[in-house]
């Protein structure tokens, strides 16, 4: 998400992997992108995704609906009539996404 809302900037430019891992373990997180597209709500979602413990992070299904709701609200504000995330069988997609997440979790548990 950070890459999208930062306009395609590279995260952690010039940082070697070992330093990056240490910084992340110490709680460092990227700053909020400085533009109108990334408001506090979007940055808050990013920070949720960066939680150290996976169970504290939102699922893809939760992200899908959260971001869809934000886009829907922004569409009214921006007078944009098209939302690619809505109107394409949301319930079916949510079920599909949940099934995929459950399958991935099952595979992850089997591999550990």
Image (cartoon, rainbow, N blue to C red):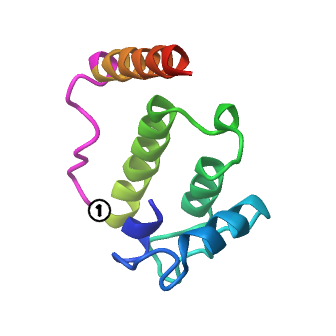
Task: Give the structural element (helix, strand or loop) at label 1.
Answer: loop
Main SS of the magenta segment? loop
Q: Residue 3's x, y, as percent?
A: 41, 68
Query: Magenta stretch: residue 83 in it?
Result: yes
Query: Residue at (57%, 21%) from the top-left corner?
Result: 112
Q: Quadrant of residue 43?
A: bottom right
Query: Residue at (57%, 56%) from the top-left corner?
Result: 46
Query: Residue at (36%, 23%) from the top-left corner?
Result: 97
* Relative to 21, 93 lies left or right: left
Depicted 102 relative to depicted 75: above or below: above
Q: Quadrant of residue 53?
A: top right
Q: Residue 28's x, y, as percent?
A: 72, 69
Badge 1: residue crowd in 10 Å (few <14, some 14–19, many ≥20): few
Query: Residue at (48%, 14%) from the top-left corner?
Result: 106
| Pick the front one: 43 or 109 | 109
Name the residue tied to disc 1: 79
* Relative to 84, 11 lies left or right: right
Depicted 18 relative to depicted 111: above or below: below
* Relative to 43, 11 lies left or right: left
Q: What segment carries the magenta color?
A: 80-92
Q: Quadrant of the N terminus?
A: bottom left
Depicted 91 relative to depicted 13: above or below: above
| Pick the front one: 103 or 64 | 103
């Amino acid at each position: 998400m950070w890459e999208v809302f930062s306009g395609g900037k590279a995260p952690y430019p010039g940082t070697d992997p070992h330093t990056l891992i240490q910084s992340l373990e110490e709680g460092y997180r990227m700053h909020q992108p400085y533009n109108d597209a990334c408001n506090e709500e979007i940055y808050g979602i990013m920070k949720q995704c960066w939680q150290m413990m996976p169970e504290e992070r939102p699922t893809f299904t939760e992200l899908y609906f959260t971001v869809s709701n934000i886009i829907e609200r922004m569409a009214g504000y921006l007078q944009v009539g098209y939302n690619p995330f809505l109107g394409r069988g949301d319930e079916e997609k949510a079920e599909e996404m949940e099934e995929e997440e459950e399958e991935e979790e099952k595979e992850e548990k089997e591999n550990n």
